[in-house]
Image (tube, helix red, strand yellow):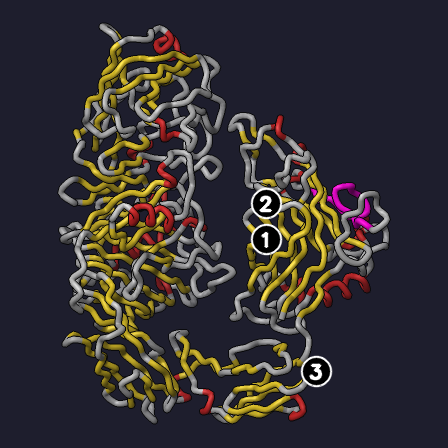
Amino acid sequence: MKTGRKLIKRPLSLFLVLVLVFSIPFVPGADAAVNENTVLLASENLAEGIRYTEEDVQNYAGKAGDRVRFNHLAVSSGARNIRITAGKAKETVNAVETIGDQAQREISRGNQVVAGINADSFDMDYGSNRGILVQNGDIVTSQPYNSYTETQPAFWVDSSGSAHIGALRAGGTIRIGGSYQAEADFINRNHFMGPAGYLSPANSTRIFTSDLTADHVMRNGAGKAPADQAYALIQISGFSGFLHAGTEYTGKVTALYSSAGFPIPADCIVYAGYGTKAAEVRGLAAGMDVSYVCHLYSGSYTENPDGTLNNRGILQDDAVTAVNSFQLLAQNGELNHAVVDATGTDQNARTVIGLTKDGTIHVLTVAKAGAYFSASQGSTMKDVAEYMLQTLQCTGVINMDGGGSTEMIARRAGSGKPTTVSYPSDGSSRIVSNSLLFVSDAQPTGVVGQVLVDGNTSLYKDSHTSFSVRLTDQYGNPISAQGHSIVWKAEKGAIDQSGAYTAPGSACQDTVTATVDGVSGTANVRALDLSGMNSIGLRETGAIAVQKGAKKQFALQAYDAENQTVLIDPSAAKWSLSNAKTGSMKNGLLSVTAASGTATVSANFGGKTYSIPVVVGPKGQTVDNFEQFPIEGYYAGSVLYGNQNQYGGKSSMLGLETKSTPNSRVRDGSRSFRLTYDTSLWAWDDSNQKRTANGTANLVPLWDTGKDYAGHGKWNEKERAAMESSFTAKAMPKNFGVWVYSGDENHDGVSDNKSCMLSVSLYADCEGGYRNETKAKPKILLLTDSMDWIGWKYLQADIPQDWKMPIVFNYLSFSNTERILKQSQNYKTDVLFDDLQFNY
C-alpha cells in the first residue's frame, strides 16, 4: 500500500488515483490563472469498498494562496459487507452528543463503525435535528413542513444498499373509533419556531413517541405552541417504541390531556392536535380503537388546502437510513445557483456528500483554521460544489451542517475504534444532533491484507528518521504488528530492519518498502537539498524558558515549495550557546546546568545563522493579578449586557473586590476582579421562547485612553502601555491559567454557573501588539465547558506550541449556553477572577 507524500497538479480539476478501490476519471474544468497543487497526506482502505484520504490542496479553486484540507471518504457502489446507518444523540429526539459517542453506542451493539460524519443541522438549545431522520427503517423524525423536503433534500439509502439524494417525506394516516380518520404526517416535531420548527404549521396534528425527551415527558420546544392544544395518549399493542415505515400499529386511547407535561410510556404514542386541529383530538375518548401507519415517499407531492399531503409522491418504505441536508448545492450535474451564489464568499468548514452516476458516494469535510489548526481556510459552498462536480464527478451534492459541527471520524489501521481525523474548528468534537455512520460487517480474518508505512517523507539529505507499519486484513480490520516479521527495503537510502532510515546524500526520490507476510506497503520519500526548500527557520519562535536540569531539543524547521514540512536532522547544523554558564549544547540538545541566566541558542545551516533567546529560571509570568491597574482599565461587554459595554468605574457590573469588602472572597493578595452576571439583562425572544443568543460576558482590557468612558484620565497611556507589556508573553508559554470563583447564591448546593463555559482569547503572531489585531486574529481556547464548582478553582488551557510569538492576552469570555432559561428563572451572581498567568 503506497502512502506518504504525492503531489498532483491540475488547472482547476484534480486527478487523484485512489489505489486498490477505483480511479476517479478526470474531466478538465475551465482554465485558471493558477494551478491547484494537491498533496496526498494519507490513503488507506477502512473497509473493503471504503477508501479514506487526506488531501492538502493549495491554490484551491485556482485562487493563488488559498489552501484547504480535505478529509475524504469514497464508498464504492455495491461495496460488500458495508452498511450505512444514522446515529442519534442519546437515542433521544431532543438531545446532543458527539459523533464519537454516537458511534461508540453502535459499536457496543456489535456494529463495526469504520467512519462517520456529522449530519443534519439542528436546534443547539434542544438538540432536535431540522429534517427527516430514519434509522433502520424507523422514522425518528419527519419533515418539519412538506416543502422542506424539496428545498433541503435528504441523503437516504434503500434496502438494497443503493444511495440517493432527493426529497424524502413521511406521510401518515390515523384512524380512531368508527369514523375518525386524519392525515398525521409530522412525527416528533415538537417545535414551532427556531431551527427545528420555523415554518412548521401551527394548526396541525402530530405524532410523538417516548423518545421525544430524555425523561420521556411530552414537552413542546422552541416557539409558542398554539394556546389550544389537545393530546391523546395511545397504547400500542406490542409496540417497541419505534415507528417503522409501512407498518400498521393498532391500540387504544388510554388518556386525554389539554396541555403538555405528562409522561409517555415506552409502549405508547401521542396524537396531538394544535390550534384549529385541537378540537378533533379533544373529541376523542378513552377506550377508542386506534390504527396508525406512516409511509415514506420520494419525488414531488401535492397538498390539501389545510396543508396535509394529498399526492404524497412515490412510495419509498424500503428507505432504511436517511439524514437530511442543510442545502442542495448541485443536482443533475449542475450547480444550484439559488444557494451557492447567495452564500457568496463565506469560507467556512464544510461537510458535503455527493453521488456519482455509478452510485459512488463521496463524503468530504473541509477544515477551517482555528486555535489548533491553521493550514486550511475553509471553502465557499460554490467552490466545494464545483470540486465535487468537476473533480469527483458527482451529479448531486448536498451540504450538511458545517462550521464548528464539521467532523469526520475513521477507524484507521492500527486502531480498534474510530477517532477524529478532521480538524474541528473548535479544537474538539462538538456535540451534535445526529450523524451518518459507515459500518463494516466483515469479520476479522487475522490475515494481513494491507500494509501502511508511516514516517517523515520529506527529509534533508543525510537526515535520519524512523518508519513504522500499521496492518489490517483485506477488510480493513486492524491487526497488531507485534509478532509479525517486517522486511524493510529502501531503493536509494539506507534502512535497517527496525525501520531506522537514513536519507541519500543528494536530492532524489526514494521509495521505502515494508513487507509483512508477503504483503507490501510503500512510502514515497523525497530527499531534498537547500534548493528544494522555500523557507528555513527554528521550530520555536520568541524566547524559550527552561529550568535547571532540563534538556531541551531545538530543531530547524523547513518547508518545501508545496508548504510541506521538511525534516532536517539536528546534526546537519552547527549549534552554539552564547553563555556557557547556563549549560551545554550538542546537536541542538540544550542541557541546562544553571539555576538562572540568559543565553542565545544559534544554529548555522546552509550559510545562514538562526537564533533564539533562552531564559533560565522562570516557571511562569503573571499576566494580571489585579493589584496593579485601576478598575478604569477594564470593561465588560457582549450579549448579556445587551451589547452595551459596562465600563470600569462607571458600572456596578464590574469591580475590584478587596479584603475589606464585607464577606470578601478575595483569593490572593489584596484584590480580585468581580464580574456581576445578571440574567435579567439577557434579552428574551418571546416568539422563539428562548434567549436571543448565548449569554456571553467578556472581561476585556481597555486599550483606549483619554476618552470619557476611560474614567476622566484615571486610565492613561502610561498605564495602558504597562498593561500591554504585562499581557504579552515574555517566553513561549505552555499554557494559560486563571483562578475562577463560582458562587451559589441560592444555597442549593449547585453552582450558579453550571451551564456556563469559560474561554480565553489570545493573540498569536501579534507583532506590534493589540494595534495589529487585523493581522493577528484572536484564537479562542476553552478553559471549561461547565463551571460546575462552588468557590475557587484553577483552570488551564494548553497553548499549541506551533503558535508564533508574540502571544498577547486578549480577554476572558464567560458564556451561559442555557438559552431556554425562562424569565422566571433569572438569577444574579458574581464571578471572580484572579492571577491570570502564562505558564512556561
Give the quarter of the image for residue 331.
top left
Of pointers 2 and 1, the one earlier in the residue sequence: 1
Q: Residue 681: tell me if it is visible.
A: no
Q: What residue type is labelled 2?
A: Asp
Residue ID at (40%, 35%):
128
Which residue position is annotated with label 1? 759
How dense is the environment of label 1, judged by Cα within 10 Å: few (below 14), some, or many (20 and up)? some
Give the quarter of the image for residue 412.
bottom left
Q: Does the magenta stretch include residue 132?
A: no
* Image quarter (top left, top right, bottom left or bottom right) of the N terminus: bottom left
From this view, report whether residue 672 is shown above or below residue 676.
below
Question: Total label count?
Answer: 3
Secondary element type, mark 1: strand
Which residue position is annotated with label 2? 788
* Image quarter (top left, top right, bottom left or bottom right) of the C terminus: bottom right
In the rendered structure, are the residues bearing label 2 and label 3 in contact, judged by CB atoms less than 8 Å apart? no
Secondary element type, mark 3: loop
How dense is the environment of label 3, judged by Cα within 10 Å: few (below 14), some, or many (20 and up)? some
Give the quarter of the image for residue 308.
top left
Residue ID at (59%, 53%):
759
**Residue range highlighted in magenta:** 644-658
Task: Give percent across and percent down for residue 337.
Answer: 33, 44
